[in-house]
Image: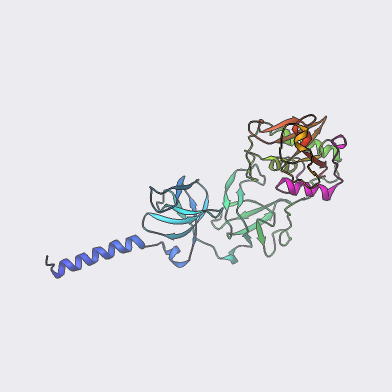
């Protein structure tokens, strides 16, 4: 078949148009290797740029992700805050690209994904997650635990002062410099308050979560579910503003560093943290021959006195609940206890 010059030119133009439409990228993506984006509506992240590909996970509205590249007109390759990579639709219905802000425009860099909240409290409504590498401006230090910050879009909110979340440079409004928060063992709000009153505040704070569902590896920034150490940590945080380490083994070490631990259940005091090893069976004989001084901590809770512990270990067990220790597997699994105050 013979083509006229006009037909050849038209064919070439159409081919070029199709080619460029399939590989075009946003100007911002063309200028940098990656770009921050926010999920606008729940969307599936898939293993390949196809609706028939397997689903990695469902991204939720408000999540922050990084766009690695635009594969074609229909698909972005992206990475979520946990490092998982996959492909999502380019439709503006699902994703909004964000303009990056140079580092010098902020005085803090996000070190790891952290909740950005509407109020200075772990129960405050989450605006979104700040992503590792984002720049924010610290407007004020609300207290020992919270900064008021502004993100690159001018949205204001509150972020933990823990150094693991923000790397602060320059002067913070109010005169302080750098990070002053800590990962573990921040000061109790009122250190002069009697210890027994502090203990009752901690227990009361924990009791209000009775029945809260159990979730292994629960999010430390929410109170909708707990695992054992998350619950203990939240009770101390709510009760006396003491931020304990995030897991039971570190909490155990914190107690050992703070006070004299006891391996005798009879010596426990109300408010002590109690630590347990893994379940081996419901009878004492299942634990014969085990050197408990070397056993790993796998569970902890708050001792209430009278042989009872406030803790959480499963949804079948009722989520946050009160259990008897004496004569149960909890007694046989007990390693040590002590005060965190």
Magenta segment boundaries in residue numbering: 240-269
Q: Position of residue 252 (x, y in %)?
A: 77, 46
Residue 239 to residue 153: above or below: above
Residue 318 to residue 15: above or below: above
Image quarter in which the C terminus is found: top right
Q: Which residue is drawn at 74% across and 49% down?
A: 250
Q: Which residue is drawn at 60% across and 43% down?
A: 125
Image quarter in which the N terminus is found: bottom left
Taking the view exactly as shown, the residue that stands out farthest to the bottom is: 5
Q: Is residue 28 left or right of residue 277?
A: left
Q: Nearer the viewer, residue 80 or 118?
A: 80
Q: Where is residue 176 in the image (x, y as percent from the top left)?
A: 74, 60
Q: Which of 41 and 44 is in front in this view?
A: 44
Q: Position of residue 312 (x, y in %)?
A: 69, 36
Q: Where is residue 92 in the image (x, y as percent from the top left)?
A: 41, 51
**Quadrant housing residue 303:** top right
**Quadrant housing residue 103:** bottom right
Q: In this view, does 195 lie to the left or right of 34?
A: right
Would residue 113 be visible to someone looking at this image?
Answer: yes
Taking the magenta stretch, the answer to whether it contains residue 262 is yes
Q: Is residue 33 left or right of residue 168?
A: left
Q: Residue at x 60, y 55 (%)?
A: 150
Would residue 244 be visible to someone looking at this image?
Answer: no
Taking the magenta stretch, the answer to whether it contains residue 291 is no
Colouring used for the render: rainbow
**Quadrant housing residue 198:** top right
């Amino acid at each position: 078949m013979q083509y006229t010059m006009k037909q050849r030119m038209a064919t070439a133009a159409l081919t070029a148009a199709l080619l460029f439409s399939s590989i075009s990228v946003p100007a911002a993506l063309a200028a940098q290797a990656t770009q921050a984006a926010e999920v606008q509506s729940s969307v599936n992240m898939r293993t390949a740029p196809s609706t028939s590909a397997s689903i990695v996970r469902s991204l939720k509205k408000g999540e922050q992700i990084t766009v690695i590249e635009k594969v074609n007109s229909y698909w972005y390759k992206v990475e979520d805050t946990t490092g998982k990579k996959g492909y999502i639709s380019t439709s503006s219905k699902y994703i909004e690209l964000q303009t990056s802000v140079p580092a010098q425009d902020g005085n803090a860099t996000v070190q790891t994904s952290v909740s950005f909240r509407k109020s200075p409290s772990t129960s405050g409504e989450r605006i979104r997650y700040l992503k590792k590498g984002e720049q924010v401006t610290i407007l004020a230090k609300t207290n020992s635990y919270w900064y008021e910050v502004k993100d690159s879009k001018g949205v204001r909110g509150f972020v933990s002062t823990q150094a693991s979340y923000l790397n602060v440079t320059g002067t913070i409004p109010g005169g302080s410099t750098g990070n002053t928060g800590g990962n573990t063992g921040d000061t109790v709000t009122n250190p002069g308050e009697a210890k027994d009153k502090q203990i009752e505040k901690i227990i009361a704070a924990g009791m209000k979560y009775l029945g809260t569902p159990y979730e292994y590896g629960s999010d430390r920034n929410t109170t909708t579910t707990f695992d054992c150490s998350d619950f203990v940590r939240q009770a101390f945080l709510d009760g006396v503003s003491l931020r304990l380490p995030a897991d039971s083994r570190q909490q155990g070490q914190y107690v050992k560093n703070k006070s004299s631990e006891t391996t005798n259940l009879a010596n426990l005091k109300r408010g002590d943290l109690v630590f347990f090893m893994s379940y081996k069976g419901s009878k004492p004989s299942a634990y014969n021959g085990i050197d408990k001084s070397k056993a790993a901590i796998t569970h902890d809770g708050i001792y209430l006195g009278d042989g009872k512990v406030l803790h959480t270990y499963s949804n079948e067990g009722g989520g946050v609940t009160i259990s008897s220790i004496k004569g149960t597997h909890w007694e046989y699994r007990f390693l040590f206890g002590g005060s965190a105050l």
